[in-house]
């Protein structure tokens, strides 16, 4: 097995999906014996950090709202030029210390334009290094709404052509091809590598979770309406006698959590929790999953072979989850309900349809994206 050093940059601004996917990639790289520097710029999430990697926690930044235009610092104030300069220098110092053979940027240049103040200098520094490292972009299956603007896509291609050698698309092209949301995909040619979706290995079913209904909203920042509707729909379903475990996510606002707690207390059989470390095991044992259609959640559902209803988040002009849900529903793997149509009765009807269909086969799509990506990166590190 060839050794090598990889520097992986990730910035999460609202939920933790980007962080979770990058951490899964980092773990796969570590399993191959590579040394990994993991530079993360969002609010700290210690339980998601890849054990064994050198963690570089940059000054945390988050998004002020769903437009993602304004960055906030750890105290909730808009960042200023001095803050940007200090963070840029910290990132460049970490890059110099790592002496990496491969630089991987998660999402950029296909998103995270807000971080150009530090990413363009990082790319310049990497390009000037001798020996020059391989420079790789890592991107999910679907670009978000604002990222599909033609002028912005022209800019993405320009930056990629200037700095990057390879693109890893964490998707199975039989389900979602990159051409669907990036109009220049064909121009990337052999530099574009489909890896399969990144999913954690399937967990053994939790014995005490058999037959539960598992309701979740990822990090929880935008999931309150779905969670509330699911609790209200419970009595209308054939699963009303089962335990409904509602997992809000750490980012659900305190007042929203309190409102859900009051609603749950009025419904015997509803368990409300912020977080479950054993979520994959409970998913593998559940009778049904109800969730949004974020990348990581949907891949966990498919890895578990769970029947599922997904309600894609569509706020702030986002189209990513809606397209993903539609494409997976067309293959008969999930039941999808548009957020615009979300109500207790419509959700109950969607649950009935999901229960009437067979559980999806766990090999219906390629979920080995982390290991495939790590094998490619290891080859580039040892070139």
Image (cartoon, grey):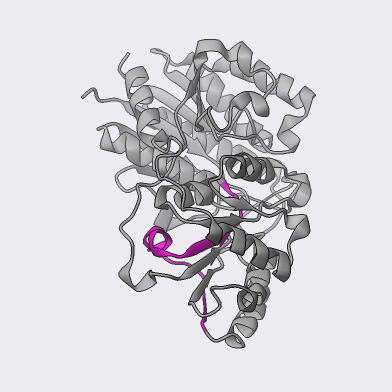
Asked if residue 308 lies left or right of residue 143, the reply is left
Residue 381 drawn above or below residue 49: above
- Residue at point 38%, 69% (across, down): 210
Task: Name, please, the residue furthest toward the left.
Answer: 1
Q: Is residue 35 left or right of residue 65?
A: left
Residue 331 % position (x, y): 56, 40
Q: Which region is colored magenta?
A: 269-294
Taking 110 as reference, is 244 left or right? Answer: left
Q: Is residue 196 visible?
A: yes
Residue 8 x %, y %? 44, 34
- The foreground one among 121 and 133 is 133
In the foreground, 4 or 221? 221
Q: Say whether residue 293 is magenta.
A: yes
Residue 256 painted magenta: no
58 and 237: which one is in front? Answer: 237
Looking at this rendering, what residue extends furthest in the front direction?
Answer: 356
């Amino acid at each position: 097995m060839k050794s090598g050093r990889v520097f992986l940059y990730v910035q999460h601004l609202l939920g933790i999906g980007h962080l979770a996917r990058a951490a899964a990639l980092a773990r796969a790289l570590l399993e191959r014996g590579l040394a990994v520097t993991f530079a993360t710029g969002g609010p700290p999430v210690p339980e998601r950090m890849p054990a064994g990697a050198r963690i570089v926690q940059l000054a945390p930044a988050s998004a002020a709202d769903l437009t993602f235009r304004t960055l906030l610092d750890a105290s909730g104030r808009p960042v200023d030029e001095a803050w940007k300069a200090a963070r840029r220098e910290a990132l460049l110092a970490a890059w110099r210390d790592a002496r990496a053979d491969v630089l991987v940027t998660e999402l950029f240049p296909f998103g995270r334009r807000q971080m150009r103040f530090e990413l363009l200098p990082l790319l310049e520094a990497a390009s000037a290094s001798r020996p020059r490292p391989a420079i790789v972009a890592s991107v999910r299956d679907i670009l978000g709404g604002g990222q599909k603007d033609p002028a912005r896509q022209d800019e993405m291609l320009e930056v990629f052509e200037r700095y990057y050698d390879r693109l890893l698309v964490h998707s199975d092209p039989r389900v979602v091809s990159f051409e669907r949301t990036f109009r220049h995909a064909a121009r990337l040619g052999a530099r574009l590598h489909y890896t399969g979706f990144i999913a954690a290995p399937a967990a053994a079913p939790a014995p005490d979770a058999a037959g539960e209904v598992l309701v979740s909203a990822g990090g929880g920042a935008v999931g309150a309406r779905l969670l509330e509707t699911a609790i209200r729909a419970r009595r209308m379903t054939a699963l009303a006698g089962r335990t409904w475990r509602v997992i809000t996510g750490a980012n659900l606002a305190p007042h929203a959590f309190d409102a859900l707690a009051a609603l749950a207390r009025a419904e015997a059989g509803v368990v409300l929790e912020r977080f479950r470390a054993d979520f994959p095991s409970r998913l593998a044992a559940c009778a049904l999953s109800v969730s949004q259609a974020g990348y990581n959640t949907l891949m966990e559902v498919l890895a578990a072979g769970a029947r599922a209803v997904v309600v894609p988040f569509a706020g702030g002009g986002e189209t990513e989850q809606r397209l993903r849900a539609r494409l997976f529903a067309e293959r008969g793997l999930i039941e999808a309900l548009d957020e615009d149509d979300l109500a207790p009765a419509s959700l109950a009807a969607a649950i009935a349809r999901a229960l009437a269909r067979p559980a999806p086969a766990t090999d219906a799509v390629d979920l080995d994206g982390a290991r495939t990506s790590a094998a490619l990166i290891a080859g580039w590190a040892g070139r």
